[in-house]
Image (tube, rainbow, N blue to C red):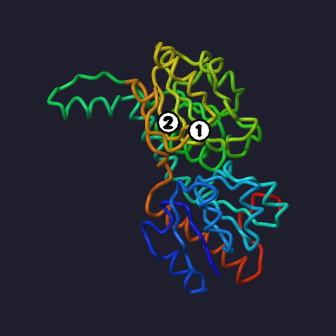
Amino acid sequence: MKVVSTSPSFAKYSNEPVKYLEKHGMQLVQLPADIQEESFIAEIQDADAAIVAFNAITPNVLARTPNLKIICKHGVGVDNIDLEAARKSQVWVTNVPNTNKHAVADFTFALMLSLARQIPTAVELTKKGEWPRIFGSDVYGKTVGIIGLGNIGKEVARRSRGFDMNILAFDPYPDHSFAEKHEVTFVSLEELLSKSDFVTLHIALTEQTENLIGRKEMDMMKKSAYLINASRGGIVSEDALYEVLRDGSIAGAALDVFEQEPVREHPLFGLPNCIATSHIAGYTSGAVNEIGMICVRNIVDVLVNKKRPEHVVNGM
């Protein structure tokens, strides 16, 4: 049985997932993360399973891969996979929703602190031989607005309590029990944007959330506020964000995700009040290895044990 992977981080820190596949008689073929569709189809047309990162799984791919039984997203977001086409083709689609929640929440706070204290600028100037006196903003005791109080958003809320922050949240499916226990106040999106010192996004990219934070929404934010997106590119309008950062309408932003990835050049890169990283929030050795193990266990369950995998996302 053949398994292909386009995830650059699959089995990167441990060979355990590969050994698990081999133990169950499976051959792994590693492919480039940026592989083009026709090349991908040529490699996967005789495969039984796929572990994918960011390459698109389209109806064309599914129509030309008759042996494919399961697609495992090596992560959480499945916006690059046509779920309905996979369901019609009777191909399981799974993701791994909980494993990297601590890594992403930690990284979110790292971005928050880096923005508030201008750490990248301080590092750059100090290494140039300057000795800058940079006055930053406080994080302790400020108001954080969490858009999306799911698994990751909840972990951000827990960390925010350690900084004695006032925690606001917007979520269409509010978990009132968690909110009461952790002193979170659910508010409208408009109230969250207008009252928060830090706005952080932890929602999936869907038709409903695409460009959720545009120019109108950014204009609701405080001039001293910061915007953080470690969720999915496309939720924040990058053109609008460039304008408000350039004009000083908000204090700063940090993006770990972009509309098009990988991105080599971007107008936002030239702005001193924008921090940009390369979609690495969930990348710690422990988190990545566990994500890989969940993927391969699901593959073995489907192909060998003939049972339903965990974390099915396409309604099968």
> Pointer 2 and pointer 1: residues touching (CB < 8 Å)?
yes
Tally the numbered discs: 2
Q: Position of residue 84 (x, y in %)?
A: 81, 54
x 56%, y 28%: residue: 238
Q: Is residue 113 above or below residue 151?
A: above
Does residue 161 appear to the left or right of 183 in the view shown? left
Q: Which mark is residue 233?
A: 1
Q: Residue furthest right?
A: 88
Residue underneath mark 2: 255
* Mark 1, secondary structure of its residue: loop
Q: Position of residue 139 (x, y in %)?
A: 44, 30
Amino acid at circle 1: Gly
x 63%, y 55%: residue: 37
> In the image shown, does 212 or 37 lie closer to the viewer?
37
Q: Is residue 316 above or below residue 161?
A: below
Q: Which mark is residue 209?
A: none
Question: Residue 309 is drawn in which quadrant?
Answer: bottom right
Q: Quadrant of the C terminus?
A: bottom right
Q: Position of residue 203 (x, y in %)?
A: 65, 41
Q: Is residue 194 above or below residue 119?
A: above
Q: Residue furthest left?
A: 129
Q: Position of residue 277 (x, y in %)?
A: 44, 41
Does residue 114 appear to the left or right of 217 in the view shown? left
Question: Residue 116 is drawn in which quadrant?
Answer: top left
Amino acid at circle 2: Leu
